[in-house]
Amino acid sequence: MMIQTILLLEQDLVKFLDRDNLNLKDSLQLLNPRFLPVFIFRISNAFYRHNLGFIAKLLALKNQIIFGCDIARGARISGGLYLPHPNGIVIGEHVRIGRNCIIHQGVTLGARGEDHEFANPTVGHEVEIGTGAKILGFVRIGDYARVGANAVVLHDVPDYGIAVGIPAKTIGLRPNIT
Ligand SMILES: CC(C)(COP(=O)(O)OP(=O)(O)OC[C@H]1O[C@@H](n2cnc3c(N)ncnc32)[C@H](O)[C@@H]1OP(=O)(O)O)[C@@H](O)C(=O)NCCC(=O)NCCS
């Protein structure tokens, strides 16, 4: 389990250094406020998976208080998570996020209503979610999709789809970037 967390963190760090065009030697990048919330989440998630929920909760709380970034300790997020500006991000307990996703500030991923607590979004690989977007309920965001700024997504977005508006509609497809 520890090895898995280290591997995920390594993927997060590689993505972060690459996107910010930084080098580990530039400064203490592990303490960079663009990376620290991801680091704290990974440790919190590791404690959660070891049934040390209380410590996990304390760490998640730390993220909330310091960065205003509320990533539930149990969220299942693959490596390469990049949060350019972590403030105001809310990610629910039952959300799943694939590899190498970029999530901008003010994004919410969670249930659509209290009656549907477990019906949470699944986000594919290599997805970018624009600032202020809300993705609610049992929806799937396809691989390589982009969600526009301030979109409210209530229905699935296909692979490579570009979704904008309230409620969000798919307005086109990204060029194949694989
Ligand atoms: C959705 C997005 C990815 C689309 O980018 P694109 O593929 O280059 O698309 P375009 O800018 O050509 O826009 C296509 C159409 O969608 C509309 N559109 C684009 N973004 C929109 C949005 N967020 N909400 C509503 N409509 C939007 C445009 O007005 C345009 O409509 P038109 O054809 O009727 O003029 C981009 O506009 C976006 O919202 N990116 C988020 C960026 C972000 O969060 N940055 C954070 C910086 S800190």
Image: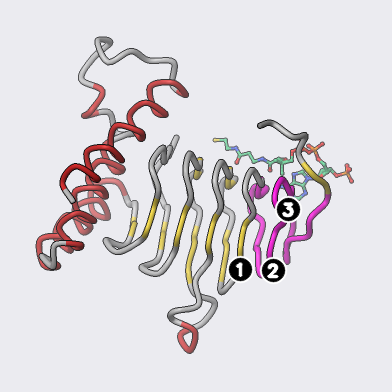
Q: Earlier in the sequence, mark 3 or mark 1?
A: 1
Which residue corresponds to the image point at 72% horizontal and 56% vertical from the top-left?
158
Label placed on residue 163: 3
Left or right, residue 145 beside residue 86 = right
Tell me if 168 is positioned left or right of 66 in this view: right
Q: Confirm or deny contact between disc 1 and disc 2 (CB under 8 A).
A: yes
Quadrant for residue 130, please give it: top right
Q: For mark 1, what is the residue?
A: 139
Q: Position of residue 114 (x, y in %)?
A: 46, 85
Residue 160 sits inside the magenta stretch: yes
Residue, disc 2: 155
Residue farthest to the right, as pictured: 171
Instruction: Kindly report which numbered mark, 3 or 1, lies closer to the viewer in this rendering.
Output: 1
> Mark 3 belongs to which amino acid?
Ala
Amino acid tagged 1: Val
CA gap between label 1 and label 2 equals 6 Å
Q: Dot 3: what SS? A: strand
